[in-house]
Amino acid sequence: MTKTLFARHVEIAWSGPGITVAAELDDRNAVPADALWGALPYQSLRGDALVAGSHL
C-alpha cells in the first residue's frame, strides 16, 4: 500500500435523522476514493442503490 502524503477526510450528513459519519479516504480502494474526492463538494437527496441507477 502506498502511503498518502496528505489525509483526505470527508463527512456525510443526513439532516433528517441528524446523523453524520466521517471517513478518511486512503489508497486501499484508490479509484472510487479519487472519484469521490474529485466530485466534492457533493450534495444529493437520499438515494437508494435499488433505484439510483447511474447515480451511484
Image (tube, rainbow, N blue to C red):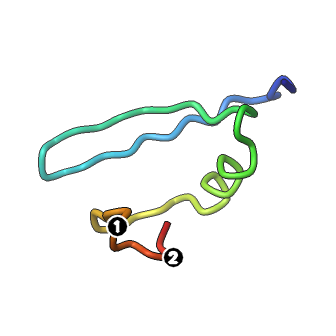
Residue 10 at x, y percent in the picture:
50, 40
Residue 9 at x, y percent in the picture:
56, 35
User: As shown in the figure, which amino acid type bears the numbered disc 2?
Assistant: Ser
Label 1 crowd (10 A; few <14 / some 14-19 / many >=20): few
- Which residue is pictured at 62% across the width and 36% down the height? 25
Label 2 crowd (10 A; few <14 / some 14-19 / many >=20): few
Could you tell whether 54 is left or right of 50 in the image? Answer: right
Is 34 situated above or below 55? above
User: As shown in the figure, which amino acid type bears the numbered disc 1?
Assistant: Leu
- Which residue is pictured at 74% across the width and 51% down the height? 31
Residue 23 at x, y percent in the picture:
50, 32
Quadrant for the N terminus in the image: top right
Secondary element at image label 2:
helix
Residue assigned mark 2: 54
Secondary element at image label 1:
loop
Q: Nearer the viewer, residue 12 or 32?
A: 32
Q: Residue furthest right?
A: 2
Is 17 situated above or below 24? below
Is 54 situated above or below 49? below
Q: Residue furthest left?
A: 17
Could you tell whether 32 is left or right of 50 in the image? Answer: right
Alpha carbon of mark 1 to alpha carbon of mark 2: how far?
Answer: 11 Å
